[in-house]
């Protein structure tokens, strides 16, 4: 499997709900708790012959004080403004069937909010592409730390990648 150029993708909601049932640290998209409008967006890297989506999140106050770690990165614009964060610890295995590429092309029917969101995505993707080698290496290093018998202290913050891979395979073979 060849690493493709980084892009931004949404994930099929049924698949996310399924993974959330396996590991409740996978961000919920459940309408029962008002999260049906949450967009699970990220960039895809290859770890151990599996595609993994590293989720992007909007920065919150605590992120401003945090330093990049093995399981976390900050995304900045050209002027140094914090745009978002990458949560490597919450990356999930995906297959092409679950990936929906985000359309970043401007459309004359876009609302102001849609235009703003697309520009934010473009800025985040620009940063990700510029830092692709670091992102891919970090994802693979974290993956190896979490699936090995290592004493990595951040392992408890990470999803159970092997368990989710088994579920991904089961889900896609239905």
Image (cartoon, rainbow, N blue to C red):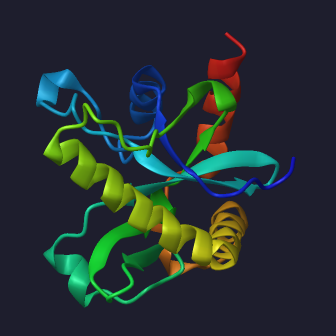
What residue is shown at x 50% (from left), y 53% (from top)? Answer: 159
What residue is shown at x 12% (from left), y 30% (from top)? Answer: 34
Quadrant housing residue 46: bottom right
User: What x and y, as percent, mark residue 40?
Assistant: 38, 42
User: What x and y, as percent, mark residue 123?
Assistant: 40, 67
Q: Is residue 171 above or below residue 116?
A: above
What residue is shown at x 73% (from left), y 66% (from top)? Answer: 148
Residue lying at the far top of the rendered structure = 174
The quarter of the rendered structure image containing the C terminus is top right
User: Left or right: 127 with respect to 64?
Assistant: right
User: What x and y, as percent, mark residue 107?
Assistant: 34, 36
Quadrant housing residue 10: top left
User: What x and y, as percent, mark residue 30?
Assistant: 24, 27
Q: Is residue 102 above or below residue 123?
A: above
Q: Is residue 155 visible?
A: no
User: Left or right: 54 with respect to 147?
Assistant: left
- The residue closer to the viewer here, 174 or 147, is 174
User: Left or right: 119 with respect to 101?
Assistant: left
Number of callouts in the render?
Answer: 0
Q: Is residue 30 above or below residue 146?
A: above
Quadrant housing residue 170: top right
Q: Is residue 63 visible?
A: yes
- The residue closer to the viewer here, 27 or 119, is 119
Q: Is residue 86 above or below residue 10?
A: below
Residue lying at the far right of the rendered structure = 1
């Amino acid at each position: 499997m060849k690493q493709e150029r980084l892009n931004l993708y949404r994930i099929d909601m049924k698949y996310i709900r399924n993974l959330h049932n396996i590991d409740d640290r996978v961000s919920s998209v459940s309408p029962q708790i008002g999260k049906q409008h949450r967009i699970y967006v990220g960039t895809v890297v290859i770890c151990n012959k599996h595609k993994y989506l590293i989720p992007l999140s909007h920065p919150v106050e605590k992120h401003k004080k945090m330093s990049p770690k093995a399981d976390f990165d900050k995304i900045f614009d050209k002027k140094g403004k914090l745009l978002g964060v990458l949560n490597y610890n919450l990356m999930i295995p995906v297959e092409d069937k679950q990936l929906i590429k985000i359309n970043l092309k401007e459309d004359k029917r876009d609302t102001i909010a849609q235009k703003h969101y697309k520009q934010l995505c473009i800025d985040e993707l620009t940063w990700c592409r510029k830092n692709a080698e670091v992102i891919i290496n970090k994802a693979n290093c974290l993956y190896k730390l979490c699936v090995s018998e290592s004493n990595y202290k951040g392992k408890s913050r990470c999803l159970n990648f092997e368990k989710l891979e088994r579920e991904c395979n089961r889900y896609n073979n239905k």
